[in-house]
Amino acid sequence: MAFTSKPNSGRTGARSIPGARDIQVWDPLVRLIHWSLALTILLNGAVVEEESQVHEWIGYIALGLVAIRLVWALIGPKHARFAAFPPSPGRAVQHLRDLLAGDRRVHLSHNPLGALMVYNLWISVILIGITGYMMTTITFFGIDWVEEAHEVVFGWLLFSVALHVAGVAVDSWRSGVNLVRSMVSGRKTIPQGREVE
């Protein structure tokens, strides 16, 4: 597999792991969308009043971020594209079996479980945006099932975010790659001798 890799040369992160490879994975747009989407979820989930205009606009921003990310998954760099992390329940199950068997391979893009989570998060944000918009229309304003669907999907999104954070922590521990740092810097520091997929 071809990728941009630099040996341990004193870069922050790689310096503490002798023989580590430093590989560019996440481009600036992917990182900006990731952290901006996380911020919108935090704001609408814990800071902004649900009935406010600000809540509504933050929801539209979240929907726009997902739309841009979906387009970028078609035209962006290799690791940002759908082809780098196809949704595959079968691969996800096999990945889970491999993990339980002690597999410590590093996936440059999302691992199969992480890929399913990414699609789940995107779909959840889209559904929240659709039901949120519906609640502003004459046809669906005040309709109980629309409001309930909006709340249920948002609850599912928060649960999914918690699972995502837990998965990042577990995978960072398992693989030896600090995934949070990589989503800030765009680079993954791969420990020496670790197989890359």
Image (tube, helix red, strand yellow):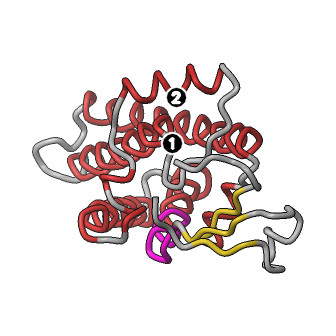
Mark 1 element type: loop
Q: Which residue is mark 1?
A: 111
At label 1, the amino acid type is Asn
Residue 136 in the image, given as x and y percentages of width and height: 23, 53
Identify which residue is drawn at 54% across, 58% down. Answer: 38
Residue 151 figure quarter: top left
Which span is picked out in magenta? Answer: 26-35
Q: Looking at the picture, tell me which residue is in the foreground, 115 or 193.
A: 193
Residue 41 in the image, given as x and y percentages of width and height: 51, 54
Q: Looking at the picture, tell me which residue is in the foreground, 43 or 177.
A: 177
Identify which residue is drawn at 76% across, 63% down. Answer: 20
Q: Residues within 10 Å of mark 2 (few under 14, many from 20)?
A: some
Residue 36: mark: none
- Dot 1 and dot 2 residues touching (CB under 8 Å): yes
At label 2, the amino acid type is His
Q: Which residue is most to the left?
A: 139
Q: Is residue 19 magenta?
A: no
From what the image shows, is residue 3 above or below residue 145?
Answer: below
Q: Which residue is mark 2?
A: 95
Identify which residue is drawn at 26% across, 43% down. Answer: 131
Q: Residues within 10 Å of mark 1 (few under 14, many from 20)?
A: many
Q: Earlier in the sequence, mark 1 or mark 2?
A: 2
Identify which residue is drawn at 80% across, 69% down. Answer: 13
| Alpha carbon separation for disc pair 1 and 2 | 8 Å
